[in-house]
């Protein structure tokens, strides 16, 4: 599978330094972004199940359980190395019964239709090799009336903030990423993936085309990142 060979292997290579770099490169603001995103989720009933797509090292899944938004979270990710680290974090938090991780593709979710009361994805949709297919899959496994929540990078509207953001994202972040991760290509790819991705109304339009209703978005930190929500 081409997607696994590229995206999966890329994140396998940087998995051990991924959390460190996330916190370092965002000046630790990424933790607050996840908290604020999860706060917008409606709490599920005790028996309700939530699917976290592109779960990575399970930071969002852990935050969902900490905020008591879901008692049962299933996370799925292409990278076996990322999910291995996520399982260790879950074990240390004593949440093995609440959060289960497995390896798999967002483009071919291995679940029946209408399986989950909520679906989430943090900083993952821009890495889908086929965005529309990934959105359709998330819509398919979501139960009617269920909530979708997506957290993703975007670009600031303010010109001065956008200039500083672009300078940092284009030059400083890839350099620091390469030095810390010791991977020459990974953080150059991550930079390009943000600059080439859609955001704001363009992404809510794609959500609507994928079959979601009532798509909406809210920017955080001057538009550096955006929370999207929708219903099936």
Image: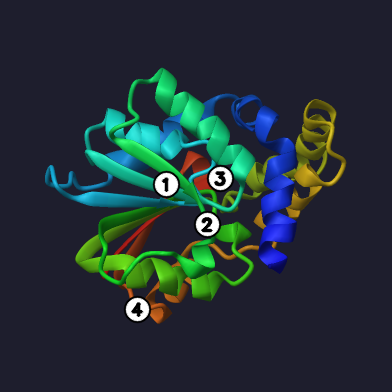
Which residue is rendered at x = 14% and y = 47% of the image?
47
SS assignment at label 3:
loop
Which is more N-terminal, label 1 or label 3? 1
The residues tagged by marks 1 and 4 sit, at their Cα atoms, a distance apart of: 22 Å
Residue tagged 4: 211
Q: Residue 104 carries which label?
A: 2
The residues tagged by marks 2 and 1 sit, at their Cα atoms, a distance apart of: 9 Å
Local crowd size for mark 4, using a 10 Å CA cut-off: few (<14), some (14–19), many (≥20): some
Residue 96's image quarter?
A: top left
Local crowd size for mark 1, using a 10 Å CA cut-off: few (<14), some (14–19), many (≥20): many
Residue nearest the observer in this picture, 126 or 32: 126
SS assignment at label 1:
strand
Which residue is rendered at x = 76% and y = 43% of the image?
187
- Left or right, residue 217 beside residue 123: left
Which residue is rendered at x = 35% and y = 78% of the image?
211
The residues tagged by marks 4 and 2 sit, at their Cα atoms, a distance apart of: 23 Å
Dot in front, 2 or 3:
2
């Amino acid at each position: 599978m081409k997607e696994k060979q590229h995206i999966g292997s890329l994140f396998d290579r940087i998995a051990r330094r991924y959390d460190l770099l996330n916190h370092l490169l965002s000046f630790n603001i990424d933790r607050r972004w996840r908290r604020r995103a999860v706060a917008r989720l409606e709490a599920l009933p005790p028996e309700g199940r939530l699917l976290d797509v592109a779960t990575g090292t399970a930071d969002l899944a852990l935050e969902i359980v900490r905020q008591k938004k879901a008692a049962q979270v299933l996370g799925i990710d292409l990278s076996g190395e990322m999910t291995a680290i996520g399982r260790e974090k879950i074990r240390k938090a004593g949440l093995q019964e609440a959060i289960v991780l497995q390896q798999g593709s967002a483009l071919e979710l291995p679940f029946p239709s209408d399986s989950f009361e909520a679906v989430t994805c943090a900083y993952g949709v821009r890495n889908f090799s086929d965005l529309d297919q990934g959105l359709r899959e998330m819509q398919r496994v979501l139960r009617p009336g269920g909530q979708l929540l997506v957290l993703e990078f975007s670009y600031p509207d303010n010109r001065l903030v956008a200039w500083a953001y672009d300078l940092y994202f284009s030059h400083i972040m890839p350099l620091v990423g390469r030095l810390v991760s010791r991977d020459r290509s990974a953080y150059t790819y991550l930079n390009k993936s943000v600059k080439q991705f859609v955001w704001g109304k363009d992404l809510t339009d794609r959500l609507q085309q994928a079959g979601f209703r009532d798509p909406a978005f809210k920017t955080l930190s001057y538009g550096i990142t955006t929370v999207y929500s929708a219903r099936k």
